[in-house]
């Protein structure tokens, strides 16, 4: 029996390439798109079941799930993403900031919540991470907070739901349309990331799509105890290496959000020698 994948925002650049790979590998792939662009047209012509869906519209989500007629799935990929609003928190429009949190986090959980009852056993749910987990990235607070929340929710859901695995992948700098938001914002709003983005395009310095898809396939094929609840990096992690698998099997905290430095100054420790 063929496996079934549901790809939310299937016409976005990375998700589009993943759709092509899954179809080639014999999966039944169901995709959504918000705007009918060239990628959406190509996937329809490929024979995929494509559905127009705005994930911010609760009624459209309900109609989409109902239209699946109880079809059970093995893989769910959440791919929607926006970087806007670009700028310091105090300067951006808060409604736009809030909308970014919804698109990048809340609405993806809403549709995941609606679809989970129709999962097959040992199904996989995959999200995309972004920059900012290790430092304070200026000018992208809504996007960064959404990605950090997504990292944690993968761990939480993976712990709660025993017959499915949840993971998240940071693909690095990939040549996608999302960078247009930084370029359009300009240096005043985007800060140093504006020039960094221009440099990446000038030097064609991007993570290869081949590696991004390869890392996603690797996560998809691994058992829950290896990848469940973890945040992987396409660029920095040795995915595909059995040594990494063994490390992950022996370290339940690896690649998860944790507070660092708990052992530096335990409560009750002597801070000075004065009585």
Image (cartoon, helix red, strand yellow):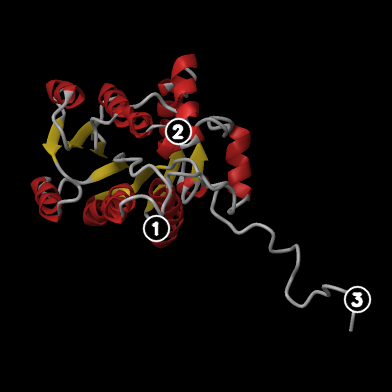
Q: Label 3 vs label 1: CA separation?
A: 46 Å
Q: Position of residue 172 (x, y in %)?
A: 48, 32
| Residue highlighted by disc 1 | 157
Q: Earlier in the sequence, mark 3 or mark 2?
A: 2
Quadrant location, the C terminus: bottom right
Q: Label 1 vs label 2: CA separation?
A: 21 Å
Question: Eyeballing the image, is 198 above or below 230?
Answer: above
Residue in the picture at 32% in, 40% down: 82
**Total count of labels:** 3
Dot in front, 3 or 2: 3
Say left or right for 233 vs 153.
right
Mark 3 touches mark 1? (CB < 8 Å): no
Secondary structure beneath dot 3 equals loop
Say left or right for 183 vs 39.
right
Secondary structure beneath dot 2 equals loop
10 Å crowding of disc 2: few (<14), some (14-19), many (20+): many
Mark linked to residue 273: 3
| Residue highlighted by disc 2 | 171
Q: Earlier in the sequence, mark 3 or mark 1?
A: 1
Residue in the picture at 15% in, 33% down: 35
Q: Residue furthest top?
A: 203
Res 9 seen here: yes
Q: Label 3 vs label 2: CA separation?
A: 49 Å
């Amino acid at each position: 029996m063929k496996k079934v994948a549901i790809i939310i925002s299937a016409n976005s650049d990375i998700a589009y390439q993943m759709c092509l790979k899954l179809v080639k590998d014999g999966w039944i792939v169901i995709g959504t798109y918000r705007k009918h662009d060239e990628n959406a047209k190509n996937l329809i012509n490929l024979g995929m079941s494509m559905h127009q869906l705005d994930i911010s519209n609760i009624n459209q989500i309900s109609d989409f799930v109902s239209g699946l007629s109880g079809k059970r799935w093995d893989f769910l990929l959440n791919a929607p993403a926006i970087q806007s609003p670009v700028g310091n928190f105090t300067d951006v429009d808060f409604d736009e900031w809030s909308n970014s949190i919804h698109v990048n986090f809340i609405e993806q959980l809403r549709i995941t919540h609606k679809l989970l009852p129709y999962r097959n056993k040992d199904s996989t749910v995959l999200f995309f991470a972004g920059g900012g987990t290790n430092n304070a990235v200026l000018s992208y607070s809504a996007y960064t907070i959404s990605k950090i929340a997504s990292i944690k929710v993968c761990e939480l859901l993976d712990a709660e739901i025993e017959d499915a695995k949840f993971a998240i992948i940071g693909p690095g700098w990939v040549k996608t349309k999302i960078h247009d938001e930084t370029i359009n914002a300009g240096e005043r709003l985007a800060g140093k990331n504006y020039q960094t983005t221009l440099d990446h395009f000038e030097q064609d310095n991007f993570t290869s799509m081949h590696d991004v898809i390869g890392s996603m396939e690797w996560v998809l094929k691994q058992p829950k105890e290896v990848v469940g609840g973890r945040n992987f990096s396409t660029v920095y992690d040795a995915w595909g290496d059995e040594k990494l698998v063994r490390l992950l099997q022996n370290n339940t905290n690896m690649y998860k959000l944790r507070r660092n430095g708990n052992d530096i100054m335990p409560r009750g420790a002597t801070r000075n020698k004065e009585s």
